[in-house]
Image (tube, grey):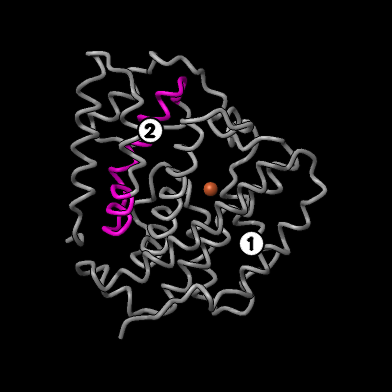
C-alpha cells in the first residue's frame, strides 16, 4: 500500500517552524533569513512530491513508498534541514560555513535540543536528524544504512531543486543579497576555474571551496545533475528550464566547450529520466 503523504497533514509542524523563526525577528538586516523561510517551504513541498512519486520509481526505491515512517522522516527532515541557518546568521552574519560553522551540524543540534519532533517515534526522529546532519555533505558515508540513505537522498534532491531556483534568480539579476547568496565570488563574465570545469568532465561534484568566479557557480550547479537520485527531481529540473538558462550564460570560449557539451548531454538525460534501477 502506497503511503499517502499530504503536505496539509504537516500544518502543525510548519507552524512550529514559523514560531521558531519568529524568535529571530530581532536580527538586523534579516532579508537573507526571510529567504531561508521561503526556501524551507519549497524544499518541504519538493520532498512531499518526491515521496509521492516513489510508486513510479524502480525497486528498491518503490518499496520505500510503503514505509510510512521513512516517508514521514523525509518530509520532516526537509522542513527542518536549514533551521541552523538562523542562529548561524544571527551570530556570524554570513551563510558561509567555512567562515562560521557547519550549518547542518547546527541544524541537527537545534532540532535535537528544541525537540522539534518530540511527538514522533524514535525511528522517525533519528532518521530525520541524521538526514539533516548529512544534507550538505559533499559525499555521504559509504556505510550509511539504506533507510538513512533514502531519507537523506530525499532531502538532498529537494534542497538542490530549490537551490537551482534561487541560484538562477541571483545569477540572472542584481538582487540586493546577490553577493551573499553567491558566496562573494568574483563576477568576471569570461572567467572560470579550470579545476571546476575538470570536475564536470570527470563526473565529480564540484566543491564550494573551489569556486572563485560566478561561472564556477554555474558549473557547480551543472555537476549536481550527477547526483540527483530521483527521476521526478531530474525531470522537474529539466522541465523548469533553469539549467538551460544556466548553461546559456556560460562563456562561449573554446576551452570550456567540452564541459558545456557534457552538461547539455546530462540535461537531456534528466529530461528523459525514468525510474532508477
Ligand atoms: Fe542547508
Residue at disc 1, secondary structure:
helix
Please tell me which residue lies in front, 130 or 241: 241
Whether disc 1's CB lies below 8 Å from ligand 1 is answered no
Between the C-alphas of marks 2 and 1, the distance is 29 Å
Task: Name the image quarter holding the C terminus.
Answer: bottom left
Residue at image position (45%, 20%) is 213
Other-residue count near label 1 (Cα within 10 Å), few / some / many at <14 / 14–19 / ≥20 = many
Residue of label 2? 220
Q: Provide the residue span drawn in magenta.
A: 210-239
Residue 50 shown left or right of residue 261 in the figure: right
Q: Is residue 223 magenta?
A: yes
Q: Quadrant of the N terminus?
A: bottom left
Q: Which callout, 2 or 1, points at the residue further toward the start of the chain?
A: 1
Above or below, 138 against 21 in this view is above
Above/below status of 1 relative to 25: below
Q: Give the image location of residue 13, x and y in percent.
A: 62, 71
Q: Label 2: few (<14), some or many (≥20) within 10 Å?
A: many
Query: Which residue is at the front of the view, 23 or 92?
Result: 23
Eye-nearest disc, 2 or 1: 2
Q: Is residue 24 left or right of residue 158?
A: right
Is 127 included in the stretch rendered in magenta?
no
**How far from the left and from the top, in percent, is residue 71?**
42, 72
* Callout 2 secondary element: helix
Q: Residue at x 33, y 65 (%)?
A: 146
Q: Which of the pair 70/253 is nearer the observer?
A: 253
Q: Which mark is residue 111?
A: 1
Q: Residue sitting at 34 percent across and 41 percent down?
A: 224
* 271 relative position to 159: left or right: left
Amino acid at each position: 500500500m502506497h503511503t499517502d503523504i499530504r503536505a496539509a497533514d504537516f500544518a502543525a509542524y510548519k507552524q512550529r517552524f514559523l514560531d521558531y523563526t519568529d524568535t529571530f525577528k530581532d536580527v538586523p538586516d534579516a532579508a537573507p533569513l526571510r529567504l531561508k523561510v521561503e526556501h524551507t517551504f519549497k524544499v518541504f513541498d519538493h520532498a512531499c512530491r518526491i515521496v509521492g512519486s516513489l510508486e513510479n520509481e524502480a525497486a528498491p526505491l518503490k518499496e520505500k513508498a510503503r514505509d510510512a515512517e521513512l516517508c514521514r522522516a523525509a518530509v520532516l527532515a526537509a522542513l527542518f534541514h536549514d533551521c541552523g541557518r538562523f542562529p548561524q546568521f544571527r551570530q556570524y552574519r554570513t551563510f558561509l560555513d567555512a567562515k562560521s560553522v557547519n550549518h547542518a551540524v547546527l541544524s541537527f543540534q537545534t532540532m535535537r535540543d528544541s525537540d522539534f519532533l518530540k511527538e514522533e517515534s524514535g525511528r522517525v526522529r533519528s532518521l530525520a536528524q541524521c538526514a539533516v546532519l548529512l544534507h550538505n555533505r559533499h559525499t555521504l558515508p559509504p556505510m550509511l544504512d539504506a533507510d538513512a540513505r533514502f531519507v537523506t537522498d530525499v532531502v538532498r534532491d529537494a534542497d538542490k531543486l530549490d537551490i537551482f531556483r534561487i541560484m538562477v534568480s541571483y545569477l540572472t539579476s542584481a538582487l540586493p543579497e546577490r553577493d551573499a547568496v553567491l558566496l562573494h565570488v568574483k563576477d568576471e563574465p569570461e572567467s572560470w576555474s579550470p579545476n571546476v570545469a575538470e570536475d564536470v568532465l570527470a563526473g565529480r561534484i564540484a566543491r564550494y571551496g573551489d569556486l572563485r568566479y560566478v561561472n564556477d557557480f554555474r558549473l557547480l550547479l551543472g555537476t549536481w545533475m550527477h547526483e540527483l537520485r530521483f527521476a521526478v527531481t531530474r525531470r522537474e529540473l529539466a522541465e523548469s528550464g533553469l539549467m538551460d538558462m544556466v548553461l546559456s550564460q556560460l562563456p562561449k570560449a573554446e576551452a570550456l566547450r567540452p564541459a558545456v557539451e557534457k552538461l547539455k548531454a546530462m540535461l537531456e538525460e534528466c529530461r528523459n529520466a525514468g525510474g532508477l534501477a
